[in-house]
Image: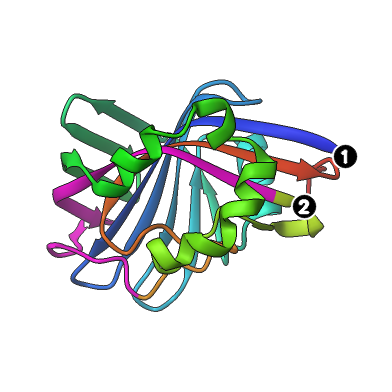
Amino acid sequence: MGMRWIFDGHIAGIGTASGLRAVVGLWQESPFGPFADAMVELPSGRRILLAPTAEVADFIAAVYTFDESRVGNVAARHTGGALTLDAGHLRLRAALGARTALGTAARLIPRPLAVHPRWLRAVNPFAALLSPGVRTAGTAGGGRREYYGVTDLHRIDAATVSWDGVDAGPLADVRPAVGFGFSSVPPRPGIVRVRTTVEGDPVTRR
């Protein structure tokens, strides 16, 4: 199995009318302490990582696939019914909505089971049937294994998103699916409570 890294927090998936799509991670617990990051896929298909430190950028870039990594301040806040992100090139203001049916179902599963890799391997074949493009277990960069244990899901009902100061247009579905790793976020914009587990060889500095 090798080493195991655990990240506990939230992942938000956003689509826009311009075709820009973003995946924002807000990690309350991680091997690097609390932090936020953003993965952006531009309408051209170019994939860019925005990370707060070189150490975090190196780890994420070893697990996922990007055309470019940029290190700089990434400030995110998830309070009540709102999500905000200021990451230099990317700015986001989102209004969160009600818990979805999948979120309600996820909360019925005891958390220790819901985040366990063995359970996530077992339910992986059914994940895409419930939410197209989504997987709960798969292979990450460098032959590592990765698992997503979701325990809640809320809609994102509205958002303003800008890239390099240019408005990306109204909120839209995340289509096409993002191509950072083996799994996309759900097509409908939303924010999930999640534990991400990565297993495999150590990540070395580039």
The quadrant where residue 64 appears: bottom right
For image coordinates 34% across by 42% down, the residue present is 105
Residue 47 rendering spot, x and y as whole percentages:
49, 65
Task: Say whether residue 54 is left or right of residue 193.
Answer: right
Residue 165 rendering spot, x and y as whole percentages:
22, 55
Highlighted magenta segment, given as a residue range: 146-175
Identify the secondary structure beneath mark 1: loop
Separation of disc 2 and disc 1 at Cα?
9 Å
Measured along the vertical axis of the image, is residue 4 above or below residue 186? above
61 inside magenta stretch = no
Q: Nearer the viewer, residue 159 or 144?
A: 144
Residue at the bottom extreme, as displayed? 44
Residue 80 rendering spot, x and y as whole percentages:
18, 24
Measured along the vertical axis of the image, is residue 99 above or below residue 206? above
Q: Which mark is residue 2?
A: 1
Q: Which one is earlier in the sequence, the residue at label 2 or at label 1?
A: 1
Q: Colour scheme used in the picture?
A: rainbow
Task: Say whether residue 167 is left or right of residue 104.
Answer: left
Amino acid type, label 2: Arg
User: Which residue bears the numbered disc 2?
Assistant: 144
Q: Is residue 134 visible?
A: no
Instruction: Count numbered badges in the picture.
Output: 2
170 inside magenta stretch = yes
Identify the secondary structure beneath mark 2: loop
The reply to whether the C-beta atoms of the residues labelled 2 and 1 are less than 8 Å apart is yes
For image coordinates 67% across by 35% down, the residue present is 55
